[in-house]
Image (tube, helix red, strand yellow):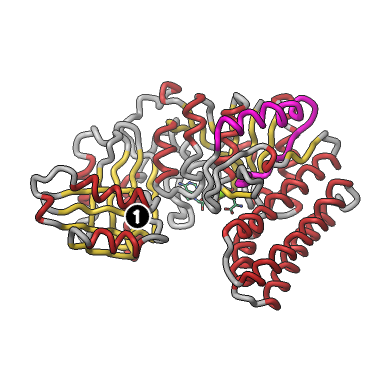
Amino acid sequence: MIVMKFGGTSVGNSKAIQRVGNIIKSRLQRKPVVVVSAVSGITNKLVRLGQIAAEKNHVLATETIEEIRKAHAAIIAELKIGEDAGIQKAFPEAIDYLTDLSDRLLRAGDLVKHLVDELLSIGEYLSANIVSAYLRSVGIPSQFADSRELVSTDSRFGRALVLKDETELNIKEKLLPVVAKSVPVVQGFIGKDSFGRTTTLGRGGSDYSATFIGALIDAEAVEIWSDVDGILTADPSLVPNAKRIRKMSFQEAAELAYFGAKVLHPATLLPAIEKDIPVYVLNSMRPQDGGTKISKLSDGNGGNDGVVKSIAYKEGLIVITVTSSRMLMAHGFMSSIFEIFDRYQTPVDLVSTSEVSVSMTIDQVEHLEDIHRELLRFAQVKIEENKAIISLVGEKMKSTPGMPAKVFGFLTDIPIHLISQGSSEINISFVIDEADLPVVINRLHDKLFSGTLNPELFG
Ligand code: ADP
Ligand code: ASP
Ligand code: MG
C-alpha cells in the first residue's frame, strides 16, 4: 500500500484533478490510499467566511458562500460528474451545511472555535468527494472515506492532536477493508474529537494526515504531491533559482519543515521516521520528474555529509528576553520561565542564554500578554516583534570546520539577534529583522549554492 497526498493546487481545478486521476491510475497495483487538501484558496476563503460571519456581515457572508459554491460547481461541471450519486448527495448537503454554520456564527457574533473547525472542514469534504467521483467516472473503483470516522483527536480546535490508538483501530476496521477493493479518498487536515465534534490539525495539516495514515497502515511509501519539483534549496517564492534536492535524510527534512519550509507541515516526518517509511515530495504537474526522496540516512548521502542542503525561514517571530540578576548562579530559574510557556501551551523555538538573561523566540502570540505579565513578576522583560529565523540545514554541517564562520562572514552588515547551532548536528539557526529576510536568504543562497553542485544531490 502507498499513501498519495494531493495538495490544494494539485486539486485546484478540473485539469489538475484530471492529472491527479492519471497519477493515481499509474499506481493502482500499489494499492493507494488517497489523501486530499481542499481546492486551493478554499481554506483561506472559509477562514475569511468565519470572520465575516462572526462580525455579523450577512451580505458578505452570503456572497462568500456563493463564491465557494460556484468554484466547486464549475469543477463538477467540467469534470462531468454532476450525475454521480455521491456528488448529488454531498455537494448540496455541504453548501446547505455551510450556510447553516455561517448563520450560527452570525447569531453567535463570535468565532466559536468548534464551529470554525466545522466550517473549515467543508473544503476537504468537497474536494475528497469530487476526486473520488472523478476516479469513478474514469473507471477506477473509488470511495469517499470520511476522515471523521477514521482520525480521532483531542479537542484542541484549530490544532488538534491525533489520538494514535483510537485512530489505529478505526483505520484497521474501516479503511483497510476499503483499500482491498477500491481507492479510498480521505480528507486531509480533518479529524473528530471524542464528543463527535469536527477538529482540524493546523494549517497545512494534510501532509501530516498522509504520513500518520501511512504509518498506521504500514505503507511502503508516502507521496506528497505538490506544485514544486520537490524540496528545494530555498523557498522558490523568495529565491527564484532555488534548486531541487534529490535526496535527504528524515532528520534534515524534519528540521526544514519545523523551521518553516512550507512545503511540508512541521509534524509530517515524525510518523514516517517511527516506521521508517520513505516520503517522496513530487510535482503533480510533472509527475515523471522524480522529486525528492526523504529516507533514513543510511540510504546514502553519497558521502556528501557536511553540505548545506537547504535554507528555511520562519517569519512573524517574537523575541522575548528575560533578564534578572537573580538568575546568576540560581538553579530553578530556567524551569520557572519555561513553566510559564508550558502553561500557556506556547512552544519556544530558539533559546540562548547569558549569565543574567535568556532570550527565546515564539511564533504563537495568542497568550503573549499573559506570558509577559507572569514573567514580569520576577524579571525584566523585553519583547521584540517582526523578527525572522533563518535555518541552514544539512547532515553533519555543524561539525564541518569553519561552517559558522563562513556563513556569518557573508552577513557582516546584517544585525543578528540570536544564534543557535541546534542540539542536532544538522542545523544552524539565527534570528534577524524580518525586513532583512529577502536579502539574507538570497545572499546565502548565492554563496552556498553557486558553482558546480553534486548532481547526485541537487538538480
Ligand atoms: P500544497 O498545497 O501542495 O500542500 P503548499 O503551498 O502547502 O502546497 O507547499 C508548497 C509551497 O511551499 C511551494 O509552492 C513553495 O512556495 C513553498 N516552499 C517553501 N519552502 C520550500 C522549499 N524549501 N522547497 C519547496 N517549496 C517550498
Ligand atoms: N486545506 C488546509 C490548509 O489550507 C490543509 C492543507 O492544505 O494541508 O491549511
Ligand atoms: Mg501544504
Residue at x 28%, y 51% (from the top left corner): 430
Looking at numbered disc 1 in the image, what kind of residue is underneath it?
Ile
Residue at x 39%, y 54% (from the top left corner): 314
Residue at x 34%, y 39% (from the top left corner): 308
Magenta range is: 163-192
Question: Residue 410: horizontal and vertical position, in percent?
Answer: 24, 52
What type of secondary structure mainly makes up the magenta span?
helix
Q: Nearer the viewer, residue 110 or 271?
A: 110
| Tally of numbered discs | 1
> Splitting the image into 4 quarters, where does residue 279 fall?
top right
Question: Residue 4: horizontal and vertical position, in percent?
Answer: 64, 36
Residue with the mark numbered 1: 362
Question: Residue 36: horizontal and vertical position, in percent?
Answer: 66, 44
Question: Residue 250: horizontal and vertical position, in percent?
Answer: 44, 32
Q: What quarter of the picture does the N terminus occupy?
A: top right
Q: Is residue 186 magenta?
A: yes
Residue density around tag 1, few if under 14, some if 14–19, many if 20 or more, within 10 Å:
many
Q: Nearer the viewer, residue 156 or 456?
A: 156
> In this orientation, does residue 285 appear?
no
Q: Is residue 285 left or right of residue 370?
A: right
Q: Is residue 348 magenta?
A: no
Residue at x 80%, y 36% (from the top left corner): 142
Depicted 369 relative to depicted 406: above or below: below
Q: Is residue 45 left or right of residue 262?
A: right
Secondary structure, mark 1, is: strand
